[in-house]
Amino acid sequence: MKLHEYQSKRIFAQYNVAIPQGQVASTPQEAREIARRLGKRVVVKAQVLVGGRGKAGGIKLANTPDEAEAVADRILGMEIKGLRVRKVLVDEAADIREEIYLGLVIDRARRRVVMMASAAGGVDIEEVARETPEKIIQVVIDPFLGLRDYQARELAFGIGLRRDRVGDFTKIAHGLYRAFEACDASLAEINPLAVTGDGTLLAVDGKMVIDDNALFRHPDLAEMRDVDEEEPAEAEARRFGLSYVKLDGQIGCMVNGAGLAMATMDITKLYGGAPANFLDIGGGAQADKVAAALRIILHDPNVKAVLFNIFGGITRCDEVARGILAALQEVPTKVPMVARLVGTNEEEGRRILAEAKMMTATTLVEAAQKAVAASQGRVVA
Ligand code: GDP
Ligand code: MN
C-alpha cells in the first residue's frame, strides 16, 4: 500500500526527521486559509500516488494566500498519470540550496534492506540511476544490527556532504530506517532531502510503501488507505479477500491457490492465449467469494473467455459451481466459459455446471486449449 506524501512525511517526523510545516486541503479556500495561517511563502503540492508530480505541473509555489488559492484551484481536479488530484498539501516553502536523495528499499537479490543516498537528488533521480549509477552510494543493512552509525557516515561522506552536516544527516538516516522498520515498509524515500539556506536538512518530499501482508498489525496505517486512488476492481477484490492482479490478456482466470494460478497462466500462454488477470480465490472459498471473483473478471472488457481451474481439496467443487451460477444470475454474459473442476465433490460440481451449459474439461491442457479457442471465437471438440 502506497502512502501519500503528507502521510509519509508525518510518519518521518515522528522519527525526528525535520519536515516543513503544512496541512492538507481539498478546496482552494482551504488552501488559502492554510497559507494565511502559515504566514509565509508556500508550496502547493498535488497529493496523488505517483511520482513526477513536479514535472507534471502538480507542484507550485505561491507568495500570498491569494496566490495559494489560485494555484490550488488549478491543481485540484488536474489529472496526473491518470489519477485525479483530490487533495493538495500546502507546506511552507523551503529555501532549497541542494537536493539529496535518501531512500530505503528491500533488495531481493541480497535479501537485505539497502539504504541509498545521492547528492544528485531531486526530480531526475531515475535518470541518475540509469546513466550515472556511480553517483548513488549504497549500504547494505544487517537485519539484526540495524543501520550502524558508520554506515550512515559512509553515505554522508560518499555523497560529499559537508562535515558540519554529517551529524544531522546521520540522525535523519537513523530516523528513516526506524520508520521503515516500525511500519513494515518495503520502501521509504526522501527526495529531495533539502539542504536549506540556513544549512539544515529538511525532508521536502516523502514516499512510503507498506507491505500489505503486515497491515493486520498496523491498524493505524491500514486506515490511511486512500480508496479513491485504487483500481476499483482491486479494491473490490481486497474486500472479498481475493488476490487479484489485472493483466492485459483476453482470458480471465479463476483459480484456487497462487501456484496453481501461475501454472494456469503459463499454460494459457503456452497454447497461444494471454491471461487477463491473476486471481487466487484461496482455500475454502464459499459461493459469495466465487461470485465476487467472477463479477470482477467479467467487469474487464478485454475478457473474451473465462477459465476456471479449481483443485478441490478444502475448497469444494460444488460450492464453487454454485458460486459461478450465482454470479451468472447477477451478471448475465455471453462470454464463453470453460471449467475444470477436480477433487472434492467434483461430480456434483460438474452436474451443476452442465445445467449452466458450460464447457467442461478434465485436464488443464484441455481446459486451456478450449479457453484459448473460445477467446478467438473457435470451438474445440
Ligand atoms: P515530485 O515531483 O513528485 O518528486 O515532488 P517533490 O515534492 O519532490 O517536488 C519536486 C521538486 O519541486 C523538488 O525537487 C524541488 O525542486 C521543487 N520543490 C518542492 N518543494 C519546494 C519548496 O518548498 N521550495 C522550492 N524552492 N522548491 C520546491
Ligand atoms: Mn520528489
Image (tube, rainbow, N blue to C red):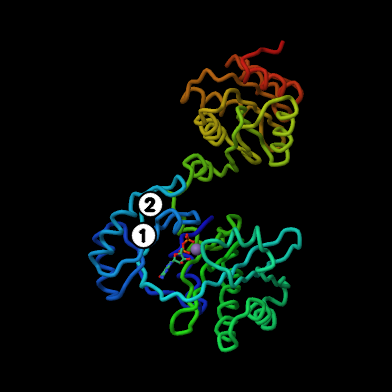
Q: Which three-letter amino acid code belongs to the residue tagged 1?
A: Val
Q: Position of residue 81 (x, y in %)?
A: 47, 47
CA distance for labels 1 and 2 = 8 Å
Give residue 66's quadrant in the image. bottom left
Give the residue number, with chain letter if any, for mark 1: 88
The residue that appears at 66% across and 12% down in the rendered structure is 379
Q: Quadrant of residue 127?
A: bottom right
**Residue sitting at x 56%, y 60%:** 210
Dot 1, how many residues are within 10 Å of its Cα: few (below 14), some (14-19), or many (20+)?
Answer: many
Q: Cβ–Cβ below 8 Å for labels 1 and 2?
A: yes
Which amino acid type corresponds to the residue marked 2 in the rendered image? Val
* Image spot of residue 194 (x, y percent): 49, 74
Answer with left or right where residue 106 lies relative to residue 27: right
On screen, 89 above or below 259?
A: below
Rendered image: mark on residue 85: 2
Looking at the rendered structure, the secondary structure element under dot 1 is strand
Left or right, 26 with reference to 340: left
